[in-house]
Image: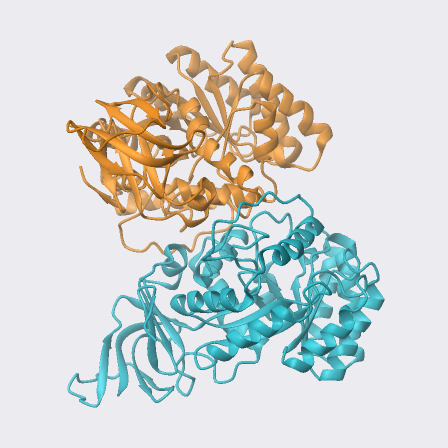
Chain colours: A orange, B cyan
Amino acid sequence: MDTIIKDVLHPTLGRVNVILEGNKIKRVTTDYITDSEQRYEFIDGEGYVMFPSFVDGHAHIDKTVYGLDWYVNDVGYERIDRIVNERDRRARINFNYFEQASRYIELSLKLGVLHMRSHVDIDTQHKLKGLEQVLEARKKYKDLFDLQIVAFPQSGLMVRPGTYELMDEALRMGADVVGGIDPAWIDRDPKGSIDAIFKLAEKHNKPVDIHIHESGDLGAFDLELIIEKTIAMGMQGRVSISHAFCLGMPNDKVTKPLKEKIKNANINIINCYQAYLPAVPPLKELMEMGINIAGGNDDMRDMWTPYGTGDILERMQLISMKNGFRRDEDLELSMTACTFNGAKVMGLENYGIDEGCNANFVLVKGRTISECIVTCPSDRIVFRNGKIIARYGENLF
Amino acid sequence: MDTIIKDVLHPTLGRVNVILEGNKIKRVTTDYITDSEQRYEFIDGEGYVMFPSFVDGHAHIDKTVYGLDWYVNDVGYERIDRIVNERDRRARINFNYFEQASRYIELSLKLGVLHMRSHVDIDTQHKLKGLEQVLEARKKYKDLFDLQIVAFPQSGLMVRPGTYELMDEALRMGADVVGGIDPAWIDRDPKGSIDAIFKLAEKHNKPVDIHIHESGDLGAFDLELIIEKTIAMGMQGRVSISHAFCLGMPNDKVTKPLKEKIKNANINIINCYQAYLPAVPPLKELMEMGINIAGGNDDMRDMWTPYGTGDILERMQLISMKNGFRRDEDLELSMTACTFNGAKVMGLENYGIDEGCNANFVLVKGRTISECIVTCPSDRIVFRNGKIIARYGENLF
């Protein structure tokens, strides 16, 4: 039986009735619809806002310890401490990637996150074990959850011989995107690292997504190298830079031309807007320039950080807060980042909440988009392919 | 009937039994206690962490629009835009301070926030109306909620003639603390503004709490003036500086001696660690120096900002995130800020969760303090004067 949602608040169209047919949104209308249409199931949408299904543009599905014993974090204060700690500890506890990825997916579905781009660590210690198990989890939930996997050389690509070959194999096995990390800070060879990443991308005809944590002028330099390489390889539109904190540095002379170049090379920016960062890319400015900037939860309850619930609505709140948004119209930009812009990064087809789109969406209790973002209610109804799969924080599939 | 809480996790003593008598914590013990003690009611504390009752060290109880129609924020981007917008709009909608303050108190009690220092606006447009009504709300909840009121010249003290006299009257009427705001940015006369504030403090023998948003060297200069005045007036221990963002600026040559002076003058720092701020006082460093630094929710769902739930556990999370805390022992510092350090600012007596303390505390579902901070569960049991006043987010009084 198909469904009619009555009197729901649509972000652009106002109060509407939404008619689903099969796995599609057939009609979105303000016309009166009688309840006597017997071939439909009616859902009362009054008091709910209709969001497109949430997109987590930057996750680490292979890292979470969610659902396990509480992980007491006593790790050192540098990034490399966290990398080494995690790699070693995973070995000691015989980490079950399949089970943890499955938990993360089930949690995501409850919350309305139906699409995720996740990095999966590829390193010479654990080799392809994590990827294999995450691929199994992806298979298990394939009808409900879109998982795009980035082969991610967390421990470095150039500095750990053998990693390149593992990355190559990972892409052959089914990883969708070539990842990378800090060509200078971690890989100690900016040109070499970026060349290697794009070589893999060319060989496998896959897009690129590189973590750039590097701040200031060093980050800016690596961004320039990536932009130049993107253009040289004709990969405009297929490259993403995650984090890109340096775009937030208070030096317009550097950042202004850099932003222009990013726009011209059609590179996506994906940022998670952690509160502690001294500088972050200015969301509103980049959007107004026409740069596609998306958001993600990044680490969620793992050996790196205790924070996170997997909820992308909560991430919209953090993104809004971090950008200093107070006006309703500004808060709504964070919704765009974590829905439409993320969908563009992932290349999702028929995404959205207009007629003809796939019927993947979330009804969230609230009077406005902004109220939903600041309250993050558990009262939400998640639709996948035209069917309710979760309600009030419980999966129903 | 008195109460025994069994098997609860105490932050410093581990798993304990807690015996209440009247409004006091009589014993905290690891000794075995038989359930047959018939004159006690038993509460199963297993799976809960015992927090001292939460202290909101910086609130604006007279501003919230919580519980009203959704407030669409379309205010300009400068602080003065927000000040003027709020002042004018309050007049237009005939804002009911008593009702809103009562709502805020009821919300706080549910969450375990039993103590609050709140600023209340004093200005020449609304005069003492807000204060009068907040005093009424304080009276209504006096057995449950400790509300300390700062007479706060939100629109400026020096720049709006007549404000000084209203502040004087506010302190006579029952405001507990002399407030102030940005002696340079708002009041345009650093020395004049600070002199006026301390003159009122001396006249009424009341402590001082000044908002300093001013950044960089200007903020540092105003901090110096406040420190000098504190010492000259012998008011060490009775002065608080709210926000003091300038302490986070990346210039050790300025901030290091300034922090030393703050410590020597025994001045409290109260910061709310909003995510968007480019610089904030480093919580851990100030604590390790011995400076009393407290936290608060600041604006909560008002005409300034849409954010906030009134939950101080959630504020502990934000404080931890903003300070880049990942280790469990670091997250616990944010609990100290929002409990013990806030209690010190407010001068609360017999505060804490040891034997002999007033039986004001919150049992929060979780395995560790840090887990409670990152999950902010609604499963919590609030004790006031030895009795349960709220459970699972519902008030029971």
- Hey, which quadrant is residue B2 in on the image? bottom left
The residue lying at 46 percent from left, 35 percent from top is A335
- The percent coordinates of residue A31 (x first, y second) are 33, 27
Position of residue B92 in the picture relative to residue B392 (left or right): right
The residue lying at 79 percent from left, 69 percent from top is B162
Position of residue A75 in the picture relative to residue A166 (left or right): right
- Residue B279 in sight: yes
- Residue A62 in sight: no
Q: Is residue B39 above or below residue B307?
A: below
The residue lying at 64 percent from left, 47 percent from top is B278
Q: Quadrant of the C terminus of chain A?
A: top left
Q: Is residue A88 above or below residue B387?
A: above
Q: Quadrant of the N terminus of chain A?
A: top left
Q: Is residue B62 above or below residue B22?
A: above
- The percent coordinates of residue B47 (x first, y second) are 27, 66
- The percent coordinates of residue B44 (x first, y second) are 23, 73
- Hey, which quadrant is residue B391 in on the image? bottom left
Tell how many labels.
0
- Comparing A124 with A321, the one in front is A321
The residue lying at 48 percent from left, 65 percent from top is B104
- The percent coordinates of residue B369 (x first, y second) are 39, 64
Q: Is residue A202 above or below residue A138?
A: above
- Comparing A210 with A200, the one in front is A210
Position of residue A136 in the picture relative to residue A167 (left or right): left
